[in-house]
Image (cartoon, helix red, strand yellow):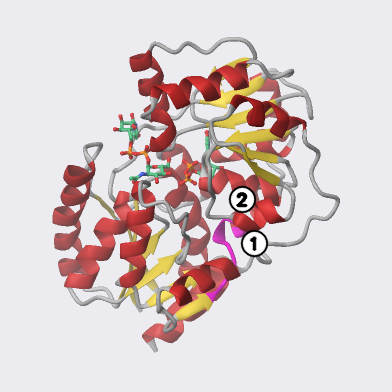
């Protein structure tokens, strides 16, 4: 069985780290790992390879940044060549980035079946580039590897019922393996004590590209009663510079963190403020209350369970959100940490 796995952005390195490990442990399974180069700064890319045991990419496309069309097209042109040369029996794609969409289009048009890890996620907001990417990717995929029941239901509502598998969340697999590392060092580096700080991440286009929202969120975070450790995504750093917004008050901006440090910081935080998909889930898995800086979420289970609130960019809701105590119950929402093994089983069965 020959599989081409395509990654390119930070959350995809995390997701693929779990799946690659499971795939490569199977005899007869050959994986060709392709890095599109959508993310390329060392702290957005290399650190994940070195920390997570991800093998070095077999092929690097080095596309870099660009507009949606130019980035997606550059990935398609380079990847078409790779898939044609490698002749895989399956292409695995992850999540909802431009890398995901480009790989889906290339594989579909070369008649190579696609397995989509994290299929079926929906925000029902088509102003999000990710929503377009995931809708289109799901509709050309053969194997839908869903993290939650909600995802399975979303696909069913769009008429997709074949090849749909509820496998659990691959981010849970990796989190279980990685958690004990670096906790004390990460807090010491950030100069914070357990339970006495917040963590903030912000990079969604809807927040960074609207100076009013960006300013409202950062002003609210700056007013919080404890330090706010803020690993700044490069997109956000540029947006803050352009809008002339300087971090003040409680905000403690730092460079994007490596995965192990980030998990360590999250696990001891009083609450997490974020517009990230992956970080909302990780906060839940670590039983840390989350305030989501969006009006909707692809992970509504976390809100229904009473551990996540949708504060959007509303300063009052953000400040009230961090003060709100979570529910007493903490049901298991994201699976048992064996999603990647199930995905490897399904890939083997697909090739048989
Ligand atoms: C992308 C994904 C988003 C995902 C996020 C994870 C799309 C449309 N968006 O958003 O779904 O949640 O990754 O972090 O695919 N930049 C650097 N260095 C880098 C990478 C990016 O400086 O290593 C800067 C560039 O100025 C670039 C900007 O960040 O133009 C945005 O990068 P891009 O990959 O286009 O989108 P993200 O906002 O990172
Ligand atoms: N992450 C990290 N360092 C950071 C911020 C996030 O390692 O400074 C990790 C985080 O633990 C999660 C993943 O990156 O596993 C989420 O990626 P991101 O928020 O960039 O994208 P999204 O999930 O929103 O697509």
Q: Is residue 26 visible?
A: no
- Return the residue nearer the eye: 208 or 78: 208
- Left or right of residue 1: residue 280: right
Residue 190 circle label? none
Are the two marked residues, 1 and 2, in contact with CB atoms closer than 8 angstroms?
A: yes
Residue 248: % across, % down: 57, 10
Residue named by callout 2: 281
Occupied quadrant, residue 290: top right
Residue occupying image coordinates x 42% and y 53%: 55
Residue occupying image coordinates x 40% and y 22%: 211
- Left or right of residue 15: residue 172: right
- Return the residue nearer the eye: 206 or 246: 206
Residue 334 circle label? 1
Q: Distance of mark 1 from mark 2, alpha carbons?
A: 8 Å
Residue range highlighted in magenta: 166-173
Determine the secondary structure under disc 2. Answer: helix
Q: Is residue 144 above or below residue 282?
A: below
Q: Is mark 2 within 8 Å of ligand 2?
A: yes
């Amino acid at each position: 069985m020959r599989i081409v796995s395509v990654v390119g952005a930070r959350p995809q390195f995390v997701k693929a780290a779990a799946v690659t490990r499971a795939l490569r442990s199977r005899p007869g399974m050959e994986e060709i790992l392709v890095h599109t180069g959508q993310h390329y700064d060392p702290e957005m890319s290399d650190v994940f390879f070195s920390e997570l045991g991800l093998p070095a990419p077999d092929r690097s496309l080095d596309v870099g940044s660009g507009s949606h069309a130019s980035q997606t097209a550059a990935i398609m042109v380079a990847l078409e060549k790779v898939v044609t040369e490698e002749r895989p029996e399956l292409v695995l794609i992850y999540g909802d980035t431009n890398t995901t969409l480009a790989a889906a289009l290339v594989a579909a048009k070369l008649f190579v079946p696609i397995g989509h890890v994290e299929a079926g996620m929906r925000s029902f907001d088509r102003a999000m580039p990710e929503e377009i990417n995931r809708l289109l990717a799901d509709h050309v995929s053969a194997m839908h590897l869903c993290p939650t029941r909600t995802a399975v239901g979303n696909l069913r509502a769009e008429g997709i019922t074949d090849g749909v598998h509820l496998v659990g969340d691959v981010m849970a697999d990796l989190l279980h393996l990685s958690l004990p590392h670096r906790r004390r060092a990460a807090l010491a580096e950030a100069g914070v004590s357990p339970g006495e700080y917040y963590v903030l991440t912000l990079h969604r286009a809807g927040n960074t590209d609207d100076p009013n929202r960006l300013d409202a969120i950062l002003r609210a975070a700056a007013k919080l009663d404890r330090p706010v450790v803020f690993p700044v995504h490069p997109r956000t750093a540029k947006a803050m510079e352009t809008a002339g917004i300087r971090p003040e008050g409680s905000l403690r901006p730092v460079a994007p963190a490596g995965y192990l440090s980030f998990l360590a910081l999250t696990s001891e935080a009083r609450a997490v403020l974020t517009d990230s998909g992956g970080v909302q889930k990780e906060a839940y898995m670590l039983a840390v209350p989350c305030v989501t800086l969006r009006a909707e979420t692809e992970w509504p289970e976390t809100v229904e369970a009473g551990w996540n609130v949708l504060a959007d960019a509303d300063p009052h809701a953000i400040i009230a959100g961090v003060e709100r105590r979570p529910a007493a119950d903490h049901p298991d929402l994201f699976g048992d940490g064996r999603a990647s093994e199930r995905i490897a089983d399904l890939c083997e069965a697909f090739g048989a």
